[in-house]
Each structure stands twice: as structure tokens, then as C-alpha cells.
Amino acid sequence: MSTYDENNIFAKILRGEIPCKKVHEDEHTLAFEDIAPQAPVHTLVIPKGKYVSVDDFAARATDAEIGALIRAVGKVARLKGVADPGYRLLSNIGAEGGQVVPHLHFHILGGVKLGTMLVKV
Ligand code: AMP
């Protein structure tokens, strides 16, 4: 597992050094619009704690942090109007998973009927 990079772009958003279009915030989580949306709804949900990925989060986060993140996903999906008819929840992990920003984030993608989950590799 790689160590946490304090200068990653989401760490800067959490420190208020660069702006974001905030959708939701609570004690443990922040949600904001993706800067390069891949669907009509593309919102990111992140923990405030310093976790690289789901793998890191599962190993080190408290039960309160884990619960808060999943609850925030549900809340943001409802706020964005995609809980019904549905959406895709995605988290890229590490180099082979295609993760670019090394701070755990869930992508909420929806607002349109989404295609095949993966193009066969
Ligand atoms: P991933 O490939 O899973 O690491 O996804 C990183 C996501 O972060 C991409 O969808 C980017 O468009 C998004 N992103 C990068 N910089 C920003 C930013 N400053 N504000 C919002 N979203 C961003």
C-alpha cells in the first residue's frame, strides 16, 4: 500500500486550498462535483481522513468513518436524484484499477442509462 500524499488534489480541496462544487459535507465526509463529468450526474464522495484507497480505508478506518462514508453515498445519490432509477458506484484502486487521485473516492455516476460496466480487456 502506498503512503498518503499530502499534496494530492483532494487533500488540497479538503484543506480549502482549491475550490470545489460542494454537494454534501459532514463530520467525516465531503462530496463534490467531478471536474470532468463522465455522465449527467458525476459526483465524488470522499472521507475527510487520509486514506489512499478502499484497500487502505478497509484496513485503517474506524467503524464511524466507514459508516459515515457509506451513508454519505446514499444521501448524495438521493440528493442528486439518481437513487431511483439507479446509478453506478465506482472506486478505482491503485495502478491497475486506474486510480489517478490517491485519496479514496467513490464516483456516483448516473442521470442516464449507463452502458456495459467494462469494455472487455
Ligand atoms: P480516479 O481515476 O478514480 O482517481 O478519478 C479521479 C477523478 O477526479 C476524475 O474523475 C477527475 O475528473 C476528478 N478530479 C480531478 N481533479 C478534480 C478537481 N479539482 N475537482 C473535482 N474533480 C476532480
Image (spheres, rainbow, N blue to C red):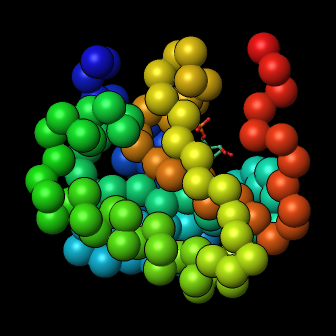
Name the residue: 77% across, 55% down.
37
Q: Nearer the viewer, residue 87 or 94?
A: 87
Name the residue: 18% across, 35% down.
59
Q: Provide residue 96's location: percent of width, then percent of height.
A: 56, 15
Name the residue: 53% across, 76% down.
76
Image position of 43 (left or right of 118) = left
Q: Provide residue 13's location: percent of width, then percent of height.
A: 44, 56
Q: Is residue 34 visible?
A: no
**Quarter where residue 8 is shown:** top left
Image position of 63 (left or right of 97) = left
Name the residue: 51% across, 52% down.
106
Image position of 99 (left or right of 53) = right
Q: How many marks?
A: 0
Up-down relation of residue 109 to residue 41 (above or below): above
Up-down relation of residue 60 to residue 111 (above or below): above
Ligand 1 is found in the corner quadrant, namely top right
Q: Provide residue 101's location: percent of width, then percent of height.
A: 51, 35
**Quarter where residue 117 is shown:** top right
